[in-house]
Image (cartoon, grey):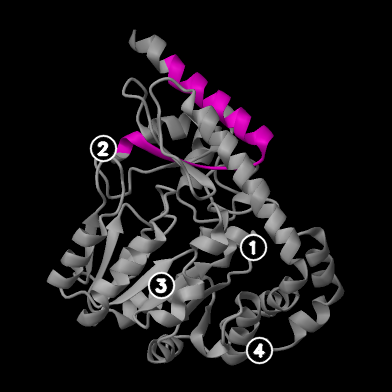
C-alpha cells in the first residue's frame, strides 16, 4: 500500500491541495471535483471484467474509428469529430499549437489560458457581480485584439451559469467575418435544464466558425478513462486539430466504453435527472446560510460568495477539511474581484450535500460569534 507523507489532518490537507487527482486513495468526501456519481452503472464494469484480457493485450483503434463511435452516440458524421485523451488534450492543441491569440472570459476553466504560450491569451472579465457574459463587448474585444480563437464555457466553470444559446449564435455570427473560431465548451451541458434544446450540437452545421468541445468525464462519471471530443462542421479545422493527436491517444478501456455506451442511454438520462435534483436541493440549502450569496446553478456544482463576516475562502476550505474531512474548491486562484471570498461546491448525494451545508454553516457561524 502506498505511503503518504502526512501524519495529521492539517498535513493531509496541504498534501491534497497540491494534487490533481487520486483523491479516492485518501479517504475524504470530495466536493471539489465535478462528476456524475450515478453513472456508469455496474454492468459497465462487469463488461470490462469480462473483456479485460482482450482490452489489455490488444491495440485500441485509432482516430477515424473513435470518431465514428462518438458520432454514433451524438448522431454526427465522424469526419466532424476529433477524439481526445480527455478534453485537456484537445485544449492543449487548441491553445498551445493552433491559436496565435486566444480570448476567454474569466473566471473560467484555467486550462485554456495555462496551455497557451505567454502573451497569447487575452482574459475578458465577466460582468461583476452578475458574472454574465456580454457577448457584444466580448465580440468587440475579440475583434480588436485580432483573436483567432474565442472560448466560451457554457455552463461556465466556476460560475455554473449557462450563456443563452441565442447569445452564442449571435457571437459566432459576429466573429465569422474576422477569421475567429468560436469554441463552446459544453462539458457540463448534460446537467443543464433541457440539455437537448440548449446544446448547439444540432446547429453545428450552420456555423462553420464554431466548434463544440466536451469532456465526457463530468457527465459520464469516467474521470479515469479520459475521453473528450471536439465537434465542428469546419473540416479544415478538424484536420488541423487531428494533426496534433497521437495515433493511439485513447486506451482500450475508453474504446470499449464508447462501444457499449449506446446500450445505456436511458440509464444516463436518469442519472443526470438525479444530479439535477440533488444540485437543486443543495442550492436551496446553501441559500439558507445567512449572508451567503449563492448563484443559481446550471451545472452540477454551486458557485458562492462567502458572507463578509466569514473567514476567507482558503481558510473556510481548510477548516472544512481538517474539522469535517470534506474538500471543496476555493477560488483564490481564479481571475475575479475578491477571489478569496468565493468557493465552488460540487454536488454529491443528497445525504452528503446536507452534511456539507451543515458543516459549512457551523464554520461560518463560529466565525460570526468570534467576531461579535
Quarter of the view holding residue 237: bottom left
Dot 1 corresponds to which residue?
Answer: 222
Between discs 1 and 4, the one toward the N terminus: 4
- Disc 2 element: loop
For this view, does 162 lie left or right of residue 280? left
Between discs 3 and 1, the one toward the N terminus: 3
Whether the residues at callouts 4 and 3 have beta carbons within 8 Å, the answer is: no
How far is mark 1 from mark 2, CA to CA? 33 Å
Dot 4 corresponds to which residue?
Answer: 61
How far is mark 3 from mark 2, CA to CA? 28 Å
Residue 284 is situated, as x and y percent measured from the top left of the image, at 53, 31
Between discs 4 and 3, the one toward the N terminus: 4
Between discs 1 and 2, the one toward the N terminus: 1
How far is mark 4 from mark 3, CA to CA? 22 Å
Residue 302 is situated, as x and y percent measured from the top left of the image, at 48, 41
Dot 3 corresponds to which residue?
Answer: 91
Residue 192 is situated, as x and y percent measured from the top left of the image, at 53, 53
Between discs 2 and 4, the one toward the N terminus: 4
How far is mark 2 from mark 4, CA to CA? 47 Å
Question: In the image, what residue occupies the spot 50% across and 26% down?
Answer: 360
Dot 2 corresponds to which residue?
Answer: 338
Amino acid at each position: 500500500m502506498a505511503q503518504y507523507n502526512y501524519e495529521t489532518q492539517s498535513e493531509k490537507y496541504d498534501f491534497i491541495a497540491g494534487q490533481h487527482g487520486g483523491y479516492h486513495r485518501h479517504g475524504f468526501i470530495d466536493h471539489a471535483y465535478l462528476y456524475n456519481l450515478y453513472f456508469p452503472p455496474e454492468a459497465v464494469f462487469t463488461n470490462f471484467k469480462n473483456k479485460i484480457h482482450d482490452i489489455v493485450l490488444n491495440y485500441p483503434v485509432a482516430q477515424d474509428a473513435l470518431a465514428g463511435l462518438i458520432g454514433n452516440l451524438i448522431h454526427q458524421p465522424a469526419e466532424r469529430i476529433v477524439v481526445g485523451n480527455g478534453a485537456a488534450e484537445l485544449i492543449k492543441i487548441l491553445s498551445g499549437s493552433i491559436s496565435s491569440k486566444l480570448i476567454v472570459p474569466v473566471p473560467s476553466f484555467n486550462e485554456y489560458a495555462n496551455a497557451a504560450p505567454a502573451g497569447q491569451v487575452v482574459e475578458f472579465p465577466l460582468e461583476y457581480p452578475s458574472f454574465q457574459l456580454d457577448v457584444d463587448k466580448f465580440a468587440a474585444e475579440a475583434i480588436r485584439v485580432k483573436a483567432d480563437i474565442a472560448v466560451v464555457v457554457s455552463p461556465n466553470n466556476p460560475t455554473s451559469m449557462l450563456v443563452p444559446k441565442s447569445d452564442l449564435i449571435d457571437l459566432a455570427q459576429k466573429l465569422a467575418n474576422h477569421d475567429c473560431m468560436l469554441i463552446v465548451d459544453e462539458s457540463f451541458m448534460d446537467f443543464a435544464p433541457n440539455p437537448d434544446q440548449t446544446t448547439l450540437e444540432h446547429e453545428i452545421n450552420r456555423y462553420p466558425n464554431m466548434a463544440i468541445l466536451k469532456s465526457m468525464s463530468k457527465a459520464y462519471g469516467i474521470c479515469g478513462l479520459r475521453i473528450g471530443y471536439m465537434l465542428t462542421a469546419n473540416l479544415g479545422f478538424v484536420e488541423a486539430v487531428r494533426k496534433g493527436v497521437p495515433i493511439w491517444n485513447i486506451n482500450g478501456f475508453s474504446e470499449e466504453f464508447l462501444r457499449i455506451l449506446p446500450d445505456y442511454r436511458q440509464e444516463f438520462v436518469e442519472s443526470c435527472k438525479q444530479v439535477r435534483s440533488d444540485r437543486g436541493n443543495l442550492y436551496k440549502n446553501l441559500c439558507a446560510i445567512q449572508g451567503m450569496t449563492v448563484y443559481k446553478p446550471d451545472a452540477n456544482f454551486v458557485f458562492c460568495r462567502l458572507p463578509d463576516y466569514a473567514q476567507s475562502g482558503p481558510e473556510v476550505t481548510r477548516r472544512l477539511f481538517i474539522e469535517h474531512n470534506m474538500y471543496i474548491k476555493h477560488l483564490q486562484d481564479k481571475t475575479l474581484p475578491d477571489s478569496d471570498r468565493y468557493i465552488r461546491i460540487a454536488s454529491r448525494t443528497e445525504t452528503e450535500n446536507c452534511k456539507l451545508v451543515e458543516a459549512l454553516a457551523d464554520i461560518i457561524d463560529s466565525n460570526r460569534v468570534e467576531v461579535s
